[in-house]
Image (cartoon, rainbow, N blue to C red):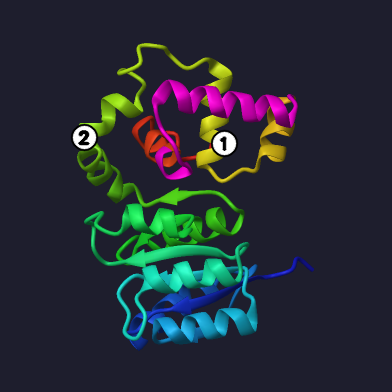
Amino acid sequence: MTERLTILIAEDHQTVREGLKLIINSEADMEVVGEAGDGREAVRLAVQLRPDLVLMDISMPELNGLKATAKLKRIIPEIKILALTRHTDDAYLQELLQAGVLGYVLKQSAAADLIGAVRTVAGGHSYLDPAMTSKVFRSFGEKSAKLRGETRGTPLTGRESETLRYIALGYSNNEIAEKLDISVKTVEAHKANAMKKLNIESRKDIVRYAILQDWMQEN
């Protein structure tokens, strides 16, 4: 029997929690193992239960989703966190990426999209709700030329593009090396060269670039 994916729901509205729990538990390979009504409880339960994934509401009492995410990533660096919100603005997106979330999904998304987001993030890869894409484009409007490499005038090579895409999707250097059949040192070189060409400095910037290039969905 396949081991179930364990999930902690952190959401301050009980009716929303119940709906999410129903959707998730309807999947044969998923199980909600805990529920938290505020950010502090989410951190406590995550440390206690060690779920595969935390579905983290952004707006919660006691400790909001951003602060709870940052605290959890300090305590359990390997934990997977999928941010959950009703709002389509991207006010928190950059901060959440910096804090360590791997995905961002809207509460009003279809059940199939929510489940897809859970599977993607639980697998260690990045997910951005499709409804957020246009917002991200507008938010990064002034930086788009820089992130597309147009300011430098030196295009990325195919390998550099592939390397950045896999990094944005959440793959480790070892996994990228295996996928591209190259050494880890070559992966690191491709990453460094690409970031220099694009004049970017962090994984957050790599994710932004990947969003602009429409790379955030796996083939």
Q: Determine which of the numbered discs, if any, sits on residue 92 in the image.
A: none
Label 1 and label 2: CA atoms lie apart by 23 Å
> Where on the picture, by quarter, is residue 198?
top left
Left or right of residue 128, residue 49 in this image: right
Q: Give the SS element for disc 2.
A: helix
Kind of residue at badge 1: Tyr
Q: Give the SS element for disc 1.
A: helix
In the image shown, does 218 or 169 lie closer to the viewer? Answer: 169
**Residue 33 seen in render:** no
In the image shown, does 11 or 79 lie closer to the viewer? Answer: 79
At x 35%, y 80%, the residue is: 16
At x 59%, y 24%, the residue is: 190
How many discs appear?
2
Q: Main SS type for the magenta part? A: helix
Kind of residue at badge 2: Gly
196 in the magenta segment: yes
Quarter occupied by the C terminus: top right
Tag 1 residue: 166
Tell me the crowding category of disc 1: few under 14, some 14 to 19, or many 20 or more residues within 10 angstroms, Cα based.
many
Q: Determine which of the numbered discs, if any, sits on residue 141 in the image.
A: 2
Quarter occupied by the N terminus: bottom right
Tell me the crowding category of disc 2: few under 14, some 14 to 19, or many 20 or more residues within 10 angstroms, Cα based.
few
Left or right of residue 184, residue 189 in this image: left
At x 74%, y 68%, the residue is: 3
78 in the magenta segment: no
Q: Which residues are magenta?
A: 182-205
Q: Position of residue 192 (x, y in %)?
A: 55, 27
Left or right of residue 93, residue 119 in this image: right
> Where on the picture, by quarter, is residue 214?
top left
